[in-house]
Image (cartoon, rainbow, N blue to C red):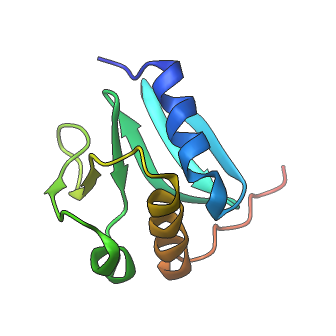
Amino acid sequence: MASNTDFVQYIADQCAGAGEIVTKKMFGDYGIYCDGKIFGLICDNRFYLKPTEAARKLLRVIELRPPYEGAKDYFYVADVDDRDYLSALVRATCRELSEPKPKKKG
């Protein structure tokens, strides 16, 4: 089941305090980016965050699960209604993620 576009927009809006949030359709669901870094996935109307130590320290509930069959575990974030909390999680996560690779010109 793919994610509802209203839910995807809601998650993007909730994370907006962290920076420029963009969602991109991927494999039937969505990747979510902050300032060019992919930090999570939105799959089947659920929000998943790349696991980092900084986010682990901030999470209210630590639950690791794969966002789709065959995927690595991500943090599953069920509490998506507190925008300050989500923005803090995204900022903390992105600080630990490497910079995106420059796109090849061609």
Question: Looking at the picture, does residue 8 appear above or below residue 6?
Answer: below
Q: Measuring 52% from the left and 20% from the top, which residue is drawn there? A: 5
Q: Position of residue 51 (x, y in %)?
A: 31, 68
Instruction: Decide if residue 34 is in sight here.
Output: yes
Q: Measuring 44% from the left and 18% from the top, which residue is drawn there? A: 4
Question: Looking at the picture, does residue 101 appear above or below residue 32?
Answer: below
Q: Position of residue 38 (x, y in %)?
A: 54, 57
Question: Looking at the picture, does residue 100 appear above or below residue 32?
Answer: below
Question: Looking at the picture, does residue 1 appear above or below residue 35?
Answer: above
Instruction: Decide if residue 25 is in sight here.
Output: no
Task: Please tell me in which quadrant of the rendered image residue 34 appears.
Answer: bottom right
Instruction: Give whichever of 64, 11 is nearer the camera.
Output: 11
Task: Please tell me in which quadrant of the rendered image residue 25 appears.
Answer: top right
98 vs 22, left or right, is left
Q: Measuring 29% from the left and 51% from the top, which residue is drawn there? A: 77
Q: Measuring 50% from the left and 43% from the top, which residue is drawn there? A: 31
